[in-house]
Image (cartoon, rainbow, N blue to C red):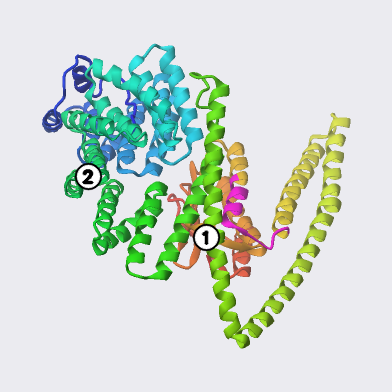
């Protein structure tokens, strides 16, 4: 569990007064505040007060019912936008971001916090910016981007220390301790979190203790101090109950259940898991509920109740994969291996063993890339922290090698089995050898073709590219050498130079496509991001967004498919920038059944298709998509924006 920072000001003033005077806010007090606000709404207050009440209800409901919180968040945002109150709009975005975070929808949470951050930066609200940075750090920590997480936390920490804000300083230190916990630096994590707990205990801040005691329990459990972990989990449960934090209550019950399960007290563990599930269901958070169900499944496997465990595991597996909840997905795969082994389903055992190994390797690679030596930038010596991080990477590499050796052992066994079968099936072996020879011949042919493409691309780069560069240089020299040249001629020279530069860029894109027989959607994503960043710099008043589904990462495109799809997207975005007069342009790519679906949507002036004569741009987009077996459709009406859709069958 992590701490989130909330905004200052008049909102939630009752709750803050209770906290600062050391009073314990009971769960029924939160419900009483909600009822009081609803009663005030019935008295028809003015527009500003109505918007503030909706915003307060969003916050109070965030720990009671996520669905209700989002309903009031939508109402608050609409009212704040009507008023044009940027401070209140930013606050609502922050509250809605907190609700999505507690639901486990980190993408939506991040989007709302970034909107809030943009407004607060425009208003130069340094304290508000620091609080949003802390919340973004929490999101990055949950999505395993520890480098960005630490950057956000440290930026927020620097501000709160500069104004001697002890409460927020220690809150962020506790969050840094949670990152250290994920990096397995348990002693240091314990130190940071203990500082926070001491402050919250002294000041009777039960809302903070609800979170920090849970984190301390997690640290002690990793350090094999079961008794200490249980003590802090029980302390967290008491604190969460006192402030009505249902998410915290559920987590505390689940954690206590895990300790009981480790102590072989299965019945007590299952009872606690069931109570945790009942509380989480009030929050309407599918992800939190799935985490609790996973613990139930683990205990049922331990008791030999494989059928019940299998039903739960198959239901939570898609959610963990969709939300990229890697730790829980790994646990799910491990348990499914045990279930299918019990059922003697060898193929399924191999399938989930491979899924577990692949996911573990990917997690290790991502960790190695993202973990940095920035953890001691301000509080510990840089050299010591670097040594700790290097030791962690070494341990990870050792684990990776152990996994690789296990895979090699598995492959050796499979090869032995294949050799045994080959001795008995000589005819099948001869057929396989013939097919192998044909495949080798095909590979050689493809290699020759690839070499020819490389030669052509080199010629294009060395000859045509050099000539175009010479043209640009010559034009620029003419403009410099004749500064008083006629304006019309100067404009023509500028056009020639710009056209040559554009041609060079297109030539580079073509060479990029020719140098690959095929490439992944991830490579196309990188190319598109470079293009969209340049477009954003040229049209900074337009909000450009690019969203690509993770499902497409495994898709491969031929060089022709890639360049045609890339060029078509370029054309659609350029058309929107030139003619649509849009404030927002969104490029999205996702898998739809057996098709790649790419949509470019703008909120511009639109047009009546019947009155528009198709120019080269629209014709070229349709022609390019037809060449690769795809389609291009355009939907637009005056005043409602335009949507261009590309589909490509796989």
The residue at 42%/20% (across/down) is: 125
Foreground of the two, 469 or 222: 222
Q: What residue does disc 2 label? A: 280
Q: CA distance from mark 2 to mark 1?
A: 55 Å
- Mark 1, Cα crowd under 10 Å, few <14 / some 14-19 / many 20+, is few
- Give SS at disc 2: helix
- Mark 2, Cα crowd under 10 Å, few <14 / some 14-19 / many 20+, is many
Query: Where does residue 257 sit, x and y in percent of width and height?
Result: 23, 43
The residue at 25%/60% (across/down) is: 304
Q: Was residue 184 drawn as part of the magenta stretch in this picture? A: no
Q: Was residue 528 drawn as part of the magenta stretch in this picture? A: yes
Q: Are marks 2 and 1 in contact (CB under 8 Å)?
A: no
Residues shaded magenta: 515-529
Q: What residue does disc 1 label? A: 611
Query: Where does residue 169 sit, x and y in percent of width and height?
Result: 38, 19
Extreme-bottom residue of the structure: 427
Q: Is residue 298 above or below residue 534?
A: below
Q: Is residue 284 left or right of residue 172?
A: left
Q: State the predominant SS element of the stretch in magenta.
A: helix
The residue at 32%/36% (across/down) is: 221
Q: Which mark is residue 359?
A: none
Foreground of the two, 545 or 453: 453
Give residue 310's quadrant in the image. Answer: bottom left
């Amino acid at each position: 569990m992590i701490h989130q920072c909330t905004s200052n000001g008049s909102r939630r003033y009752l709750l803050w007064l209770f906290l600062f005077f050391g009073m314990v806010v009971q769960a029924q007090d939160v419900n009483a505040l909600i009822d009081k606000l609803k009663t005030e709404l019935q008295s028809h207050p003015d527009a500003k007060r109505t918007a503030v009440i909706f915003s307060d209800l969003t916050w109070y409901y965030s720990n009671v019912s996520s669905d209700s919180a989002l309903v009031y968040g939508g109402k608050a945002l609409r009212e704040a936008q009507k008023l044009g109150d940027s401070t209140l709009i930013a606050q609502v975005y922050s509250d809605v971001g907190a609700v999505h975070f507690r639901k486990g929808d980190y993408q939506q949470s991040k989007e709302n916090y970034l909107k809030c951050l943009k407004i607060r930066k425009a208003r130069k609200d340094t304290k508000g910016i620091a609080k949003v940075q802390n919340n973004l750090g929490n999101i990055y920590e949950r999505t395993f981007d520890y480098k960005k997480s630490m950057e956000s936390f440290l930026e927020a920490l620097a501000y709160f220390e500069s104004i001697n804000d002890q409460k927020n300083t220690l809150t962020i230190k506790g969050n840094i301790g949670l990152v250290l916990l994920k990096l397995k630096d348990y002693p240091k994590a314990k130190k940071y979190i203990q500082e926070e707990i001491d402050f919250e205990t002294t000041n009777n801040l039960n809302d903070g203790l609800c979170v920090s005691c849970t984190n301390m329990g997690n640290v002690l459990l990793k350090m094999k101090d079961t008794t200490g972990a249980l003590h802090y989990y029980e302390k967290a449960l008491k604190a969460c109950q006192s402030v009505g934090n249902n998410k915290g209550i559920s987590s505390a019950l689940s954690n206590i259940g895990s300790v009981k399960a480790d102590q072989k007290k299965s019945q007590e563990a299952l009872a606690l898991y069931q109570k945790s599930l009942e509380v989480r269901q009030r929050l309407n958070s599918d992800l939190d509920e799935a985490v609790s169900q996973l613990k139930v499944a683990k205990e049922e496997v331990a008791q030999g109740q494989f059928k019940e465990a299998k039903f739960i595991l198959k239901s939570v597996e898609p959610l963990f994969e969709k939300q990229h909840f890697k730790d829980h997905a790994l646990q799910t795969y491990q348990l499914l291996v045990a279930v299918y082994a019990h059922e003697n389903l060898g193929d399924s055992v191999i399938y989930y063993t491979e899924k577990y190994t692949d996911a573990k390797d990917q997690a290790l690679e991502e960790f190695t890339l993202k973990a940095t030596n920035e953890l001691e930038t301000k509080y510990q010596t840089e050299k010591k922290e670097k040594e700790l991080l290097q030791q962690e990477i070494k341990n990870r590499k050792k684990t990776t090698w152990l996994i690789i050796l296990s895979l090699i052992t598995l492959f050796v066994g499979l090869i032995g089995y294949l050799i045994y079968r080959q001795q008995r099936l000589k005819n099948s072996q001869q057929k396989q050898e013939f097919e192998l020879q044909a495949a080798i011949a095909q590979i050689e042919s493809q290699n020759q073709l690839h070499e020819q493409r490389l030669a052509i691309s080199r010629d294009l780069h060395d000859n045509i590219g050099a000539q175009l560069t010479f043209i640009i240089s010559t034009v620029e020299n003419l403009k410099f050498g004749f500064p008083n040249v006629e304006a019309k001629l100067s404009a023509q020279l500028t056009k020639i130079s710009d056209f040559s530069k554009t041609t060079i860029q297109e030539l580079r894109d073509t060479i990029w496509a020719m140098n690959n027989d095929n490439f992944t959607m991830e490579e196309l994503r990188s190319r598109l991001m470079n293009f969209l960043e340049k477009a954003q710099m040229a049209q900074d008043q337009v909000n450009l967004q690019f969203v690509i589904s993770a499902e497409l990462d495994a898709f491969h495109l031929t060089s022709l498919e890639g360049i045609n799809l890339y060029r078509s997207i370029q054309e659609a975005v350029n058309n929107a920038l030139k003619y649509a007069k849009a404030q927002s342009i969104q490029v999205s790519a996702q898998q739809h059944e057996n098709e790649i679906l790419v949509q470019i949507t703008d909120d511009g002036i639109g047009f009546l298709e019947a009155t528009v004569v198709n120019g080269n741009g629209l014709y070229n987009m349709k022609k390019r998509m037809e060449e690769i077996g795809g389609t291009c459709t355009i939907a637009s009406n005056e005043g409602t924006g335009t949507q261009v859709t590309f589909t490509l069958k796989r």
